[in-house]
Amino acid sequence: MPERVHEITLTVNGTVRRAAVPGRRLLSDCLRHDLGLTGTHVGCEHGVCGCCTVLLDGEPVRSCLTFAVTVDGHEITTVEGLADGGRMSPVQRAFAECHGLQCGFCTPGFLCTVTALLRKNPAPAEEEVLEGISGNLCRCTGYQNIVRAVHRAAELTAEES
Ligand code: FES
Ligand code: FES
């Protein structure tokens, strides 16, 4: 029997997008393959590495563990949606400035996680930064610059608000 296809509507990075997805279509695959947003990456594909993190109604989620059909009607922000027009967000600029972005696999997840972290806690202490990014793995273990970037992003956000 052919698999049933569901019509879903998502607001992705502020734009209403529609897709027809089987029930088991992962949000990561929907974003990348159905909607062409290849900024979101997949690493482990089972919820461990955090590469695939996107924001669901502002909260970080593992898109590789989320069925697209379950987020019908919701708002998704991917790494492509973090910039404000042509201007990178404070988090993106801080990662660039502090060399916190090393590869394209982990970085989109870090950027989304840190964006949500700083919205909740605009001036995190060192321990809170470490805790906040503990669900995102960098396989090259280059965390020092990432941690510096989070603090710098907090500074930039405060300066600009
Ligand atoms: S690809 Fe989703 S957590 Fe690793
Ligand atoms: S910089 Fe991406 S996994 Fe280390």
Image (spheres, rainbow, N blue to C red):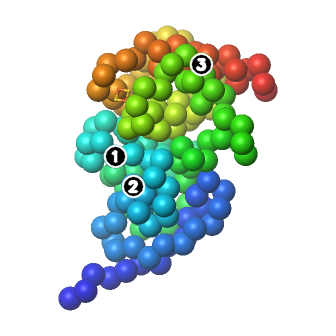
In terms of depth relative to the viewer, which is nearer, 133 or 15?
15
The span from disc 3 to disc 2 (Cα, nearest Å) is 28 Å
In which quarter of the view is residue 94 placed? top right
Rendered image quadrant of residue 115: top right
* Residue at mark 3: 97
* Above or below, comparing residue 127 to residue 109 in the picture: above
Q: How far is disc 2 from disc 1 in space, using C-alphas? A: 7 Å
Position of 78 compared to 130: left or right?
right
Q: Is mark 1 within 8 Å of ligand 1?
A: yes
Residue 124 visible to an observer of this rendering: no
Q: Nearer the viewer, mark 3 or mark 2?
A: 3
**Beta carbon at label 2 within 8 Å of ligand 1:** yes
Residue at the disc numbered 2: 28
- Image quadrant of ligand 2? top left
Nearest to N terminus: mark 1 or mark 3: 1
Quadrant occupied by the C terminus: top right
Query: What residue sits right under mark 1 in the picture?
Result: 42
Q: Is mark 1 in CB contact (under 8 Å) with mark 3?
A: no
Q: Amino acid at mark 3?
A: Glu
